[in-house]
């Protein structure tokens, strides 16, 4: 019978993650790979992260504009090729990053024509970073001066102009798409892990507008997911889980069905010198590793204190520990096995 309070510990805990920047031509894109995962968790985590990335990451966007001589958005400006509506549409596509503490600021744009007007003409100094400075705002066809005041705020998700307010007379409110994530998708692949089946790898692909890096977006989404999920159980229960993990470490570490036991040590994020030292001790799998004592590892030539500490930390994160006995453990032809061990009754 499965003990319900311990069953969740048999779920494979991912320990290997890597982030790769997009190739040349794939601007502001990157991919995070996370493994190993138990069957079904790739889709569960991938879908949750994708939805958070697309809807809940904070960024900045244009929320208002005041144009000299213009009272409402359904107007034209003498000496300017585009109508006000067209200018607003162009401002919506402005990718910016607000710097400093204020969550909303006003920036001026004053240009003498004729000529094309680009986002780089916005005057903001050290308070704003324009990601696409060559983004076209409008075209002045005559020898006139065009002046406008652009309101930019931080926010989350999509906010229509109907839900906005302004205390400044003459402001034209603009629908704001605050999300800096242009695209987010994921793939789930099956991977082998010794004799264990149903192990997955999650690949999360993210592209942003440049106001935030893909890695920063993933970090923020992960923190949001953890924070939200933590409220499914009470704080006192979280503390009890932490205590239980510590007190039951030795019993869980002897679980011969733990899939991580069959993982090769070369897949761990350890220095090559450390891996070479372990292989000289005939340690090729996690199952080999946990059967060594801490004293044995410390006596291994060239295996430093930091490496031993990293190994202990990794094992602890998976409910494992050094000095564990695995009855029936053997490696034959490079493949680990657990042979059943029968005991005679007295």
Image (spheres, rainbow, N blue to C red):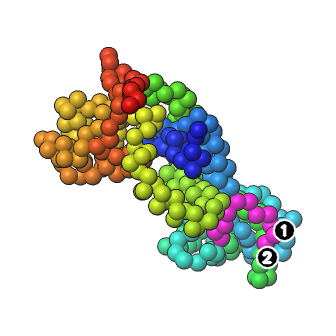
- Determine whether label 2 and label 1 are within 8 Å by CB: no
Considering the numbered disc 2 on the image, is that residue within a helix, a strand or a loop?
Answer: loop
Question: Furthest residue to the top?
Answer: 333
Would you say residue 303 is visible in this rendering?
no
Q: Position of residue 209 (x, y in %)?
A: 59, 52
Residue 158, compared with residue 290, is above or below; it is below
- Residue 66 horizontal side relative to residue 182, left or right: right
Disc ID at residue 165: 2
Answer above or below: position of 251 versus 178: above
Q: Across the whole image, how many numbered discs are drawn on residues? A: 2
Q: Along the line of sight, which residue is nearer the eye, 131 or 155?
A: 155
Residue at image location 68% in from the left, 72% down from the top: 151
Magenta stretch: includes residue 198 = no
Residue 111 pos. (x, y %) = 63, 69
Farthest-out residue, front: 346
The quadrant holding residue 167 is bottom right
Provide the residue designation for mark 1.
162
Q: Residue at x 52, y 58 (%)?
A: 241
| Rendered position, 76 above or below 208 | below
Q: Position of residue 65 (x, y in %)?
A: 73, 71
Q: Quadrant of the N terminus?
A: top right
Q: Residues within 10 Å of mark 1 (few under 14, many from 20)?
A: few
- Residue 337 versus residue 18 in the image, above or below: above
Give the Cα separation between the discs numbered 2 and 1.
8 Å
Q: Is residue 66 visible?
A: yes
Please report the residue visible at 72 percent of the width from the left and 68 percent of the height from the top. Answer: 63
> 146 or 264, which lies in front?
264
Dividing the picture into quarters, in which one does residue 80 lie? Answer: bottom right
Dot label at residue 14: none
């Amino acid at each position: 019978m499965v003990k319900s309070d311990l069953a969740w510990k048999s779920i494979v805990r991912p320990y290997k993650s890597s982030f790769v920047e997009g190739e040349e031509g794939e601007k502001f894109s990157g991919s995070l790979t996370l493994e190993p995962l138990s069957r079904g968790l790739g889709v569960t985590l991938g879908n949750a992260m994708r939805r958070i990335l697309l809807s809940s990451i904070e960024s900045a966007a244009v929320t208002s504009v005041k144009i000299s001589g213009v009272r409402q958005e359904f107007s034209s400006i003498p000496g300017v090729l585009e109508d006000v509506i067209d200018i607003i549409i162009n401002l919506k596509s402005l990718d910016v990053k607000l710097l400093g503490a204020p969550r909303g600021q006003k920036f001026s744009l004053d240009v003498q024509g004729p000529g094309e007007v680009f986002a780089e003409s916005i005057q903001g100094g050290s308070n704003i970073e324009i990601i696409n400075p060559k983004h076209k705002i409008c075209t002045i066809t005559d020898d006139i001066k065009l002046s406008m005041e652009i309101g930019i705020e931080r926010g989350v998700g999509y906010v229509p102009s109907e839900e906005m307010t302004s205390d400044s007379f003459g402001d034209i409110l603009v629908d704001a798409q605050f999300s800096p994530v242009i695209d987010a998708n994921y793939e789930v692949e099956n991977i082998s892990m010794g004799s264990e089946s149903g192990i997955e790898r999650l690949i999360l692909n993210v592209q942003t507008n440049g106001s935030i890096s893909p890695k920063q977006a993933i970090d923020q989404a992960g923190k949001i997911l953890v924070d939200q999920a933590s409220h499914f159980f009470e704080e006192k229960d979280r503390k009890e889980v932490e205590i239980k993990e510590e007190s039951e470490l030795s019993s869980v570490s002897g679980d011969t069905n733990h899939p991580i036991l069959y993982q090769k040590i070369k897949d761990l994020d350890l220095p090559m010198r450390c891996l070479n030292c372990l292989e000289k001790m005939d340690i090729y799998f996690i199952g080999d590793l946990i059967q060594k004592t801490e004293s044995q590892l410390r006596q291994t030539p060239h295996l430093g204190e930091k490496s031993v500490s990293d190994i202990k930390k990794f094992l602890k994160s998976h409910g494992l520990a050094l000095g564990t006995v695995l009855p029936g453990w053997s490696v034959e032809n490079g493949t680990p096995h657990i042979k059943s061990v029968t005991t005679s009754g007295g």
